[in-house]
Image (cartoon, grey):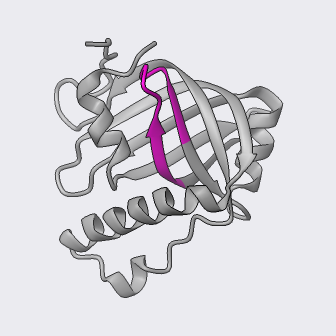
Amino acid sequence: MAIPKDLVDLITSGVSILVATRSADLVPEAVRAYAAVVSPDRRRIDLVVPNGLGDRTITNLKDNGQIAVAFSRAIDHVSVQVKGTCVEMRPTTDDDRATVERFRAAYIEGLYLIGMPRSLTGRFRALPGTMVGFEVSEVFNQTPGPRAGEKMTPR
């Protein structure tokens, strides 16, 4: 499934990214991720899961590949959930650093606008990490309000 065009800017900006997976025993796991990149055909998203904190997430993805990712903008709570299947994982490289740092700076600034001090948010780290690529199967509106939970279709 292709992500609706109007969501690409949201997903690739400095939004909160939370990745949810599950173990073989159906134990849920969640971790913050960084630096989402949407493919030109809008059918795939790549993002960075930090090593250490994201180790269980990576193990779960190797086991079953199922992933759900929430993208949420702090200033107005515009949010979407994207579900899919992991199709690629690789260590981050020096080439990924610029994308990660640009995203991280925008994320920290967005949190600053709602009152979180940079002295706290500046500690967030994404690298070293694992670049996780997944194919999109479903997209849901998660913005609080009457349409929350509604399945979205490509436009």
Which residue is at a point 47% across and 52% down the rendered structure image?
A: 35
> Measured from the top left, where is residue 10 in percent x and y?
28, 41
Where's the C terminus, which quadrant? Answer: top left
Q: Is residue 137 left or right of residue 103?
A: right
> Measured from the top left, where is residue 140 in percent x and y?
36, 24
* Res 63 quadrant in image: top right
State whether residue 55 appears in this view: yes
Which residue is at a point 74% across and 45% down the rendered structure image?
A: 90
Farthest residue, direction front: 95
* Res 88 quadrant in image: top right
Q: Is residue 103 left or right of residue 18?
A: left
Q: Is residue 52 magenta?
A: no
- Tell me: residue 144, above or below residue 99: above
> Measured from the top left, where is residue 29 in percent x and y?
65, 46
- Tell me: residue 47, above or below residue 64: below
- Tell me: residue 6, above or below residue 108: above
Of residues 1 and 83, which is closer to you in this image? 1
Predominant SS along the magenta part:
strand
> Measured from the top left, where is residue 152 in percent x and y?
31, 16
State whether residue 23 appears in this view: no
Which residue is at a point 67% across and 57% down the rendered structure image?
A: 93
Farthest residue, direction bottom: 119
Span colored in magenta: 33-46
